[in-house]
Image (cartoon, rainbow, N blue to C red):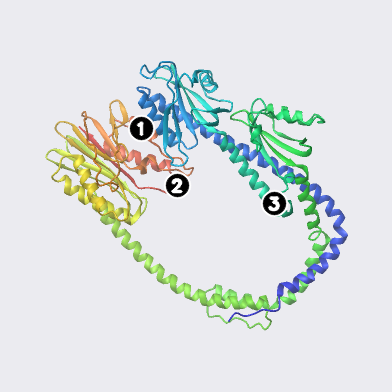
Amino acid sequence: MKKKYPRSFSRRITNRVIAIVLVTMLLLSGWVFYHSVTRFGQQIGSHFIDVMEITNEEMDLWLSAVEISAANIEDEISYNLARPSNVCSALGDELHLNPYVNGASVGFIPNYFSDAGRWFEPYASRDSVAGEINIRQIGSGQHDYFNMEWYKKGLEHPEGAWSDPYFDRDGARAVVCTYSLPVRDRKGNTVAVMGADLKLEWLKTQLEENDTKDNARRTSTFSFIEGDPTYRTYSFILGNNGEFIVHPDTSRVLKKTFFDYADPDDDGSYIKAGRDMMDGKTGSSQIYVNGQSVYVYYGPLQSTGWSMGIVVPVKSIALPGVLLGFLMLLFIGLAVIVIMIVCRMSIHSTTRPLVKLAASAEEIAKGNFKTELPRIKRRDEICRLRDSFEDMQHSLSTYVAQLTAATAQRASIESELNIARDIQMSMLPKAFPDRSDVKIFASLTPAKIIGGDMYDFHIRDNMLFFCIGDVSGKGVPASLVMAGINTQFHALSAHETQPDVIIEGLNEAMTGRNESLMFATFFVGMISLSSGAFHFCNAGHNVPIVIDADGAKFLDVESNIPLGIDSEWRYLRQNKVIAPGTTILLYTDGLTEAENTEHDQFGEERVLQLLSEWRGCSPKDIISKLTDAVHAFTAGAEQSDDLTMLAIRYK
């Protein structure tokens, strides 16, 4: 039965405090009112300046991210200028990897590709619903990009430039701003202009979210102004010529300028504010907008030369100060001194039972859960606190017993996981052959105690069979699936020589018993040690890297789909002849996707650069150096994925 506490400890204290506060506040009301209104008005103004500057920084960061993404896309396009299809594929792949860019296009100089005609402008856009990348060729006589601003700016500005806002009817089919970069071939000649589109709808949404949060914050405090537009703040962005790029009133966007709405009776402050914004200055002005006195806080967006402003009604700034002034009259001044004296005397007599209760609580804190608590006759909060401590005693006793049992169980589980790790690692090859025709080395570092990566190899009939795989997920489920795949690989490769047949056998076995809906990426290869013939098949795994005298490059691999998805899938076998002295590095995404404390990834480009520098090293040295490089890069960050590498040098 729930106990009742009719007498309230807090009520007795509150009644005494309020009586003193009311008397003292009457004496200080005038002084407090004046200073609170003045001070709070200054703080509100500083708040909106901070909001404007923070929003500007956020947008500058986003625009800078688009510029960086555009540079990445331009590098990839420059690398794939051999055929139009290569350009389209590279454009789509890079757009998929760069979420900051809404759409991207490459406009080539006239007749660059003889088969593509005078206008060749592939445009890649992201389907906002399905998340897929769509690529269209939009260049034509009707869409003559040679005369478009973004294309001309790309030719005129080698370091890149932003275009003015415009409506792209053939590409993005929305109002966008385009960041343009020239694309050069290997001789340094400009052959195209790459454009990365940013929809202005994003900027509008960003400002609306900030405005909504700010208005909601004030409305939650002063509910009586909810729905009154004269108290609402809003943000806008002006272009280089003063035109509205973003504004809550969409009828002004790209149609009207800031100066078109100057009040005829303006004393010059409105025009001056507009000119300051055009000059890229940061500041604030009190002006009249639609007959209402407002403050406008403004500052430049450095990446584009635009200017952002926040319009705040004067009465919206004054209201909190006025209300706060009245509220502060109840709590500050000389009454604080009186309250402290009276409360000290009153609480001392009222809370005396707490002294005994505190002593008992100290004993309980030492672990003496059976300590007897003092009996309190008054049915108030102190008595309620005493009863709560009594309930806590019973709860702590039960919890300690449960914790002891859970600790023992956890120790048992950790012991079993360590045994499972030893079993998993024992399934991997430990001895690497010391032969004159081939050198092999591998390593596996799981992110957890056990993981879902594996590698394997064996030599049969002067042929080297090898594989590497990565099961979706981590921990025990992934390790069990990988153990089954490892066993199947040994069974199939013992009598089969074709990698695609081995892959299909693994896929059929995994798909037939895949109730947990897991999948695995896998790569199987076979090298004839007598001729250098290299046969391989990939099931959605990371592309291996080939290291020869020319440096490091990715192997030309068809990705196929991972194991465990479609039992009817027919995997493509590929063939290649490798020259003596060539090293093949296979790895899982724990290498390229290793992250540091700033969430930057190790990346494929870094791996290629390092391997080119180490092309004369042995497989063991390559893996050792890569492992050290990853650890140095991720210093201080938790390992997020299994790290597995297998290096083979054909001698």
Question: Quadrant of residue 536 in the image?
Answer: top left
For disc 3, the marked residue is: 219
Taking the spot 88% from the left edge, 60% from the top edge, the residue there is 27
Label 1 and label 3: CA atoms lie apart by: 56 Å
Name the spot of residue 432 as percent of width and height, x first.
21, 43
Q: Name the amino acid type tagged 1.
A: Leu
Left or right of 253, for residue 24: right
Decide which of 232, 171 is in the foreground and name it: 171
Q: Which of label 3 and label 2 is nearer to you? A: 3
Decide which of 201, 179 is in the foreground and name it: 201
Name the spot of residue 247 as percent of width and height, x first.
65, 36
Taking the spot 35% from the left edge, 26% from the top edge, the residue there is 85
Quadrant occupied by the N terminus: bottom right
Question: Mark 1 or 3 closer to N-term?
Answer: 3
Q: Is residue 577 above or below residue 365?
A: above
For disc 2, the marked residue is: 637
User: Mark 1: which secondary structure?
Assistant: helix
Mark on residue 100? none
Q: Is residue 1 above or below residue 114?
A: below
Question: Mark 2 or 1 closer to N-term?
Answer: 1
Q: Are marks 1 and 3 in contact (CB under 8 Å)?
A: no
**Numbered marks: total:** 3
Question: Mark 3 or 2 closer to N-term?
Answer: 3
- Check disc 3: other Cα within 10 Å, few if <14, some if 14-19, many if 20+: some
Q: Is residue 104 above or below residue 229?
A: above
- Check disc 1: other Cα within 10 Å, few if <14, some if 14-19, many if 20+: some
For disc 1, the marked residue is: 608
Left or right of 18, for residue 66: left
Q: Name the amino acid type tagged 3.
A: Thr
Decide which of 386, 549 is in the foreground and name it: 386
Q: Which of label 1 and label 3 is nearer to you? A: 3
